[in-house]
Amino acid sequence: KKFVKKNLIDAVTHVCHPWINKYFINFSFSLYSSFSYAWFRFLLLHYFFLQTAIVLPYFIIISLISFH
């Protein structure tokens, strides 16, 4: 059963991956090309940083929002 499940997941990933990549790249590009998004991201990050005053969540949020 584990083997079958793994193959099914691999098949779904293989079929969806190019579409997900294309969508994700277009989505991230449209956001990066938007100045208002960059400003929003700046405010959001600094708001979280000041709220938590802990360095680790700040870097986690940066990495999540920066699409890396």
Image: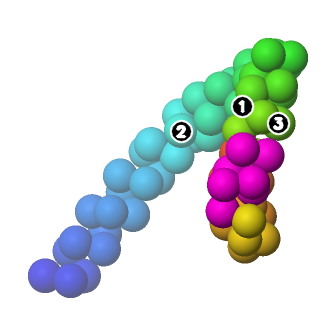
> Mark 2 highlights which residue?
20
Circle on res. 3: none
Q: Nearer the viewer, mark 2 or mark 1?
A: 1
Horizontal relation, residue 20 to residue 1: left or right: right
Q: Position of residue 62 (x, y in %)?
A: 76, 54
The disc labelled 2 sits on which kind of residue? Ile
Q: Position of residue 16 (x, y in %)?
A: 45, 42
User: Relative to residue 29, is residue 45 depicted above or below?
Assistant: below
Q: Quadrant of residue 54?
A: bottom right
State which quarter of the image contains the N terminus: bottom left
Per the model, the C-alpha gap separating discs 2 and 1 is 12 Å
Q: Position of residue 39 (x, y in %)?
A: 83, 25
| Residue located 59% across and 29% down the image | 23
Q: Is residue 66 visible?
A: no
Provide the secondary structure element on which disc 2 rests. Answer: helix
Question: Range of the magenta residues?
Answer: 46-52
Circle on res. 28: 1
